């Protein structure tokens, strides 16, 4: 599930129940809204794409995810 902290605005993913924000430690967390979830998913896709391209560059392998 994707959560959001109302205190520090941190959005994070966690399996199972969670009672505190992993960033600020406060208990002001809730399930993320649709817009927050979509932004989080898009951010993770970009982050993963970047990590895959860096790995391909380091190893010299090209694949469908390579940006060069």
Image: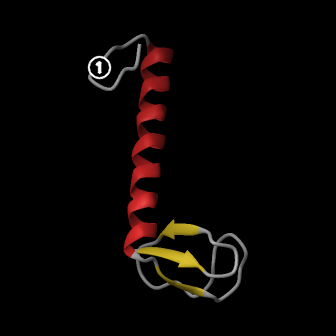
Viewer-closest of 52 and 67? 67
Query: Residue at the location (69% across, 81% down)?
Result: 7
Q: Is residue 7 above or below residue 37?
A: below
Q: Report the side of 28 relative to 1 (left or right).
A: right
Which residue is denoted by mark 1 in the rendering?
63
Query: Residue at the location (39% across, 45% down)?
Result: 45
**Which element type, helix, strand or loop, lies under badge 1?**
loop
| Tally of numbered tags | 1
Q: Is residue 61 above or below residue 26?
A: above
Q: Residues within 10 Å of mark 1 (few under 14, many from 20)?
A: few
Q: Quadrant of residue 24?
A: bottom right
View extreme (front): residue:
35
Q: Report the side of 21 relative to 54 (left or right).
A: right
Q: Report the side of 33 relative to 12 (left or right).
A: left
Query: Residue at the location (47% across, 16% down)?
Result: 57
Q: Quadrant of the N terminus?
A: bottom left
Viewer-closest of 54 and 28? 28
Query: Residue at the location (42% across, 20% down)?
Result: 56
**Image location of residue 14, percent across then percent down:** 46, 72
Q: How is the image coloured?
A: secondary structure
Q: Quadrant of the C terminus?
A: top left
Q: Report the side of 28 relative to 33 (left or right).
A: right
**Image location of residue 49, percent across then percent down:** 41, 35
Q: Is residue 61 above or below residue 9?
A: above
Viewer-closest of 7 and 64? 7
**Image location of residue 44, percent across then percent down:** 44, 50
**Image location of residue 48, percent across then percent down:** 43, 41
Q: Is residue 8 above or below residue 19?
A: above
């Amino acid at each position: 599930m994707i959560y959001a902290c109302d205190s520090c605005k941190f959005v994070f993913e966690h399996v199972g129940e969670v009672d505190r924000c992993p960033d600020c430690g406060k208990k002001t967390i809730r399930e993320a809204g649709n817009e927050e979830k979509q932004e989080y998913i898009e951010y993770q896709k970009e982050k993963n794409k970047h990590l895959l391209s860096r790995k391909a560059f380091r190893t010299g392998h090209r694949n469908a995810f390579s940006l060069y």
